Amino acid sequence: MDNIAGYDVRPGMYEMNGATVIPGGINFTIHSHQATSCELLLFRRKASEPFAVLPFPDNYKIGNCYSMIVFGLTIDELEYAYRMDGPNDPSKGLLFDKNNILLDPYAKAVAGLSKWGVEEKEYKGYRARVVKDDFDWGNNRQPLTPMEDLIIYEMHVRGFTMDESSGVDFPGTFDAIRQKVPYLKELGVTAIELMPIFEFDEMHDHRVYEGHDLIDYWGYNTVNFFSPNTAYCSKPEYNKEGNELKRLVKLLNENGIEVYLDVVFNHTAEGNEHGPVFSFKGIDNNIYYMLTPDGYYYNFSGCGNTLNCNNPIVRQMIIDCLRHWVIAYRIDGFRFDLASILGRNEDGSPMNQPPLLESLAFDPILGNVKLIAEAWDAGGMYQVGSFPSWNRWVEWNGRYRDDIRAFLKGDDNMEQAAANRIIGSPDIYNPETRGHLASVNFITCHDGFTLHDLYTYNYKHNEANGWNNTDGANDNHSWNCGYEGETDDVEVNNLRHRMIKNAFTVLMMSRGIPMFLAGDEFGNTQFGNNNGYCQDNKISWLDWSLLEKNHDLFTFVQYLIWYRKRHRVIRVDTERCSVGYPCMSQHGLTPFWANFHGHHHYIGVMYAGVHKNGKDELVYMGINAYWEHQTVTLPAPPEGCKWYVMIDTNRVDSVVMDMVEVSGNVISIPPRTVMVFESMLIEE
């Protein structure tokens, strides 16, 4: 036992990273490859200066790891940080400065960020709090939903309930989402994907444009990977940070809904050489970041720096981080932003079998976790269909989005590509090695137009972002149905409504894992903004009043989800039906004639198999993206059966409840309409 700065101390537990409460004190552990000394700084809550500075004695360091147990501390009013000294040579990537206050990379809570949109002036840099994890999960059991049964709902924690129309207590918080769980269950989704909830500083790039505050609303600039964003809590949770999020996860799991996190391991908020030094840069800059030979930052993220993910130190931190979220928060899955970066070597070159991706695929703690890759990055690497998977990783299928959008709006020569997307993209994902569930199918997500805006605007309208409308994607494959922006024209609005229903029908009838953007189910709009990353206002907030206005759209989406769940043959291959039709087949205007011609603008897809009750199960979707009626011949149903119309997006009540029979297997499909047919026994 030693005494430093008035505190009894002893060498700590070197394998226990971060700050951990133990009987009688707190264990502090941090590591740096090239630091020559380290100091622990202890602060009272919100104090500008530390009340104690404890240098780590030389004998408290083993290898590159500093560890110290400090006795007599209580966590209630305590905040902590570090200072490190060492060589400072930017050309070699060494940025040690003994005056920099450094945030613990393994911190479980970050101080000073709990008030959304407020810059807390008491803080110089970021500091950590010590968290005592005593949350009672009870008999909580995670849903462990099979991949084929997933229906993913992407949402922004704040934007989901921030508008007053949401009608919740504590809008914009985890607790507010808890009040919407009955809604999510009624809708029928089986998983929610939360946009970044790792601690980020929304004021990091704060600016004012035309009198409006623009901030880092989306949250893709991570400050710390192990701690939740405290500004998403309804009230401060001093030293119990994360409990409100845990209550949300527990409630969702109890209702059969999994929780996925959108995680950003490709870069941090420290930026490039002009950015701040608050954590990784001051601890081991040339280990945590990819650097050029002269010490500058590779920028494959488009955000200034690139995390050096396949360095053993960084790789271990990422694994430790994900394990933490699975163990402490019971998270069910992760969507990795710009995941191709996770497969780059330290010099930026692509790797054949990236050790990080392989480690995550086989890690025992992550064994039941869904791993979803955004299989591209800002450095030009596009790996949709070729992302290293080990049959564990699935991918956001960007080609599904682009091809389905282009086909539905009427582009020529898109039939074959769109038909392949609908049956699980076998031309991209080899069914022999990847199966039919490697593709996360989506038409919209946070990045781009909402589904309403996709058929309301030909062009992006990002003027409010302050970059002269130069930001955001230009290749949207959108169509305004004849008028740019909102209109009172009944004919235009009816067409837009039908196009939205067409898109939802195709999505829910496609093989793969469907995902859609929160609010699309009731026609939410971002007023043409396709890059709302900085808009913390009505542009990005869901307008829940549209749920009543477009309730028919909501009930239609609800029915589609129910229909998908009811027909397993849509989701996976089953036994062959009595007629011997393949499990999936593509059709033109005539059965099994899939030699598509670009001018027909028609696709037929049929799923055929055997229901668990032993009866044949055949479902056929016909998509007429043409602007005129087209006559379609359906495949012959099994003996004793006939085709019946189940969905017709041209009807006001698109769900056909009056069992319309198809006479002679021939039907005329109206312009820009999707119809779904089901084979049933005649006596049914």
Image (cartoon, grey):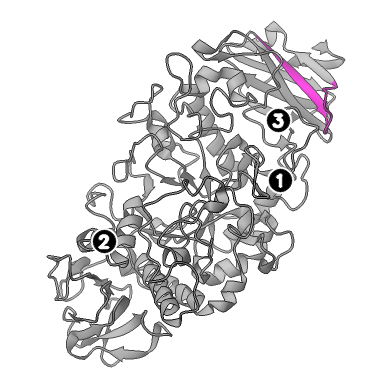
Q: Position of residue 364 (x, y in %)?
A: 46, 38
- Quick one: 141 or 276, which is closer to the camera? 276
Q: Quick one: quadrant of the N terminus? A: top right
Foreground of the two, 317 or 410: 410
Query: Mark 1: which amino acid?
Result: Gly
451 with respect to 11 (left or right) = left
Q: Is residue 297 left or right of residue 4?
A: left
| Residue 136 in sight from this viewpoint | no
Instruction: Identify the residue position indicated by label 3 in the image.
Output: 126
Task: Determine crowd level at label 2: few under 14, some 14-19, many 20+ residues with C-alpha closer than 10 A.
Answer: many
Mark-to-mark CA distance, 2 and 3 = 48 Å
Which SS class for mark 3? loop
Badge 1 marks a residue whose secondary structure is loop
Quadrant of the image occupied by residue 652: bottom left
Residue at numbered disc 1: 117
Q: Mark 2 or 3 closer to N-term? A: 3
Q: In x, y percent, where is residue 217?
A: 61, 47
Mark 1 is surrounded, within 10 Å at the Cα level, by few (under 14), some (14 to 19) or many (20 or more) other residues, namely some
Q: Which residues are magenta?
A: 37-51
